[in-house]
Amino acid sequence: MLRRSFTYAAPLVLVLTSAIARAQTATATAPGAKAPGARPSANPLDPGAALPDDGGPNAPVSKVTESLEAKLASMKTGNGLTADEAARRALVNNVDITSKQKGIAAAEAEVESTQAQFYPKLDLSARYTRLSKFTPPTLNFGGMMIDGATIFPVIPNNYALGASLSIPLSDYVLRLSSSIAAVKHTRSAAKIDENATRLSVARDARVYYYQWIRAQGAKFVAEQALQAARGHAADAKNAFDAGLVPRADVLRTLSQEKSAELTVAHWANNVAISTEQLRVAMGDKPNVDYEIGENILTDLTPFAVPLDPGAGYAEALEHRLEIKQLGESEAALREEASVERAGDYPRLEAQANALYANPNNRYVPPTAAWHGTWDAGVVLSWTPTNIFNAEAQARGVEARADEVASQRNGMKNGLRLEVNQAMNALAEANFGLEASREGLAAAEENYRVRRELYRAGKATIVDVTDAETDLTRSRLEVVNSHVDVRISRVALSHALGRDVPPQK
């Protein structure tokens, strides 16, 4: 749409400039017109036309062309914002990147948590118990009466220090490797996702930057067209007051002036939006303004375009991070399904316990003294009914893995189309740049010839004005074509994965 705006704006300038030129021609031939050699009334867009018999300078160069040349010169200074700087600043405070970094931190914590699950489990305990008063009964052993308190003395204060160690032996075989692999794949996917987001943010920032320049160019054309429209409206009114043109011509120029004002308002809003888009992308405050700092008219270094879309697609499959991220996510889910299926098998644990108590019940009769004891063994447990739940959980995880695999295949198809479109867009942009350069050369030669013919009295001011308008449009088309080439290169470089930093 932005490109078309230049095409729409230039004819507007052409129509407006032609109107005043026709009025000037009518004035020169009307009764009472000034004698040849006299200067006509000043035009806001014409600093003063030297007539052929003046013997003065060449045919006039209007303020439109002069202002355009100043605008193009400002684009060559290189003292302001560049596309690379916009990309760098966009990466600093981008909220999407911050979110992805938090996801990496969560994945790192999940790796540590999963590893901790397979450490031997050590439980420590300390216990104090106060027993109520109790009188043990008298015991009868073969007719011999024995006071129960002698065998089982009542010790009201009980203390115990305990330690229990459990080692999940079967989990080391059935669950450990798959669980660690799953969380590491998840962590890798999070890191790849963060890097892919950074590349997308940088690409978008560069595109926003070039769109911002394009919008300024369109606004510039609209402003110049408005100046021309106002000048023609004033001249038409003067001609009407002198009885040289009908009122309909005045109304038509006024209508053109209002249309030009609407176009200026439209592109002024577009510049404001594109500028705010840059501010948001780079995290700047609303009142920050920028200057163009990249010489967009400079020829770029050669770009190695793939031989055909198939070669480009193969390159993209090898480098694009989004494909790798989905591959890591799928691998994580496959490993998780293996962990779930470990619930089908019995569980083997090694256990050891240590007790230091006062009294220690393993000492008979118990005494109010500290004694330590320990025990060790293995426990094999199995709950067959858990198989149904484990299999259901595994199937659910595998279904999610299949879903990610389908997304990955879909992304490959989309990537194939993205590469194809990006290659065609760059080819079209390069062709457009060459065509615009040829058009500019033709417009410059046509303008030069018209000026010479005007000086020789063989062309009218209408011819010079038309040629000048075409020259203005051609120069802006060159600027626009340079922008198209840069945006297309950014898009193709990202599509091929050439913006992916090399692996360390």
Image (cartoon, rainbow, N blue to C red):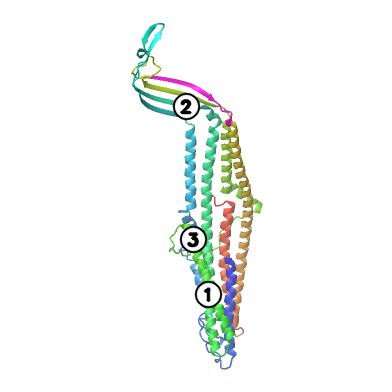
Under tag 1, what secondary structure?
helix
Magenta-span inclusion, residue 328: no
Q: Position of residue 479 (x, y in %)?
A: 55, 67
Which residue was labeled with disc 1? 261
Q: Are marks 1 and 3 in contact (CB under 8 Å)?
A: no
Magenta-span inclusion, residue 374: yes
Which kind of residue does numbered mark 1 sit on?
Answer: Glu
Quarter of the picture containing the N terminus is bottom right
Which residue was labeled with disc 3? 278
Q: Which mark is residue 166?
A: 2
The tag earlier along the polypeptide, 2 or 3, is 2
Which kind of residue does numbered mark 2 sit on?
Answer: Ser
Residue depicted at x 52% and y 79%: 230
91 relative to 147 in the view: left or right: right
Judge whether residue 69 can be spotted in this image.
Answer: yes
Which kind of residue does numbered mark 3 sit on?
Answer: Leu
Residues rendered magenta in the picture: 372-386
Under tag 3, what secondary structure?
helix
- Classify 139 as above or below 214: above
User: Of discs 1 and 3, which sits in the foreground?
Assistant: 1
Q: Position of residue 225 (x, y in %)?
A: 54, 75
Q: Position of residue 478 (x, y in %)?
A: 57, 67
